[in-house]
Image (cartoon, rainbow, N blue to C red):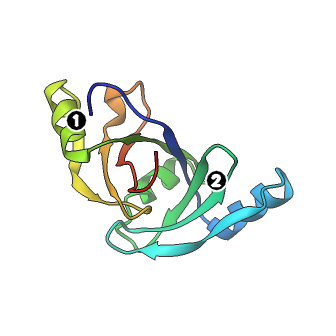
């Protein structure tokens, strides 16, 4: 990871309904570019994206009863900001560096919604914010 985070890739927003969220961003904020929702059974979520000029909003809803975002939505029934995702050059180096600095990495690197490896850093290590670190997709930056 070399000690510094890369560009903001996306902000994750957990919601009860992706379609309802898309409609909000379309009608209230004038968003025009959307990546249609798709299931990620291994992660327990359904995911869609709102494309913005400088980043994306990753809209996630629970998929199945064991979804990791069910507890979040029980505490925040209307939904809310779930995580912030930054790019890193190499996920395994980033994981080792985070652990060496005493941060709690949640699980092992796994394929995220962009088809590249991701890890999550426990919110207690980042002022209450769940941080996702994502290996920069090949062909980007």
Q: Is residue 47 left or right of residue 92?
A: right
Label 1 environment density (alpha carbons within 10 Å; few <14, some 14–19, many ≥20): some
Classify mark 2: helix, strand or loop. Answer: loop
From the viewer's perspective, tell me whether residue 25 is left or right of residue 121.
right
Residue 65 position, x and y percent, is 39, 71
Q: Circles 1 and 2: CB distance less than 8 Å? A: no
User: Residue 35 appears at what percent x and percent y?
Assistant: 62, 68
- Vertical relation: 57 (above or below) 86: below
Q: How many marks?
A: 2
Q: Give the residue drawn at x 37%, y 34%.
A: 123
Which quadrant holds residue 93?
Answer: top left
The N terminus: image quadrant: top left
At x 43%, y 63%, the residue is 113
Of callouts 1 and 2, the N-terminal one:
2
Residue 30, horizontal then vertical, whole percent: 84, 54
* Residue 57 left/right relative to 93: right
Residue at (38, 27) in percent of width and height: 126
For the residues labelled 1 and 2, the Cα–Cα distance comes to 28 Å
Q: Which residue is mark 2?
A: 78
Q: Residue 113, which numbered label?
A: none
**Label 2: how many residues lie within 10 Å, few (<14), some (14-19) or many (20+)?**
few
Q: Which residue is mark 1?
A: 104
102 up-or-down from 51: above or below: above
Depth order, front residue of 45/56:
56
Residue 43 position, x and y percent, is: 35, 65
Q: Secondary structure at mark 1?
A: loop
Single out the mark in the foreground, 1 or 2.
1
41 versus 68 height, above or below: below
Q: Residue at x 31, y 38 (%)?
A: 121
């Amino acid at each position: 990871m070399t000690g510094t985070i890369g560009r903001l890739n996306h902000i994750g927003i957990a919601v009860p309904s992706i379609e309802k969220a898309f409609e909000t961003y379309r009608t209230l904020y004038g968003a025009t570019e959307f990546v249609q929702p798709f299931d990620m059974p291994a992660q327990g979520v359904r995911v869609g994206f709102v494309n913005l000029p400088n980043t994306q909003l990753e809209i996630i809803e629970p998929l199945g009863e064991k979804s990791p975002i069910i507890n979040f939505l029980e505490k925040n029934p209307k939904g809310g900001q779930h995580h912030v995702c930054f790019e890193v050059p190499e996920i395994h180096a980033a994981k080792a560096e985070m652990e060496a600095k005493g941060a709690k990495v949640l699980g092992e690197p796994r394929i995220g919604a962009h088809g590249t490896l991701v890890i999550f850093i426990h919110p207690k290590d980042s002022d209450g914010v769940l941080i996702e670190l994502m290996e920069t997709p090949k062909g980007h930056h």
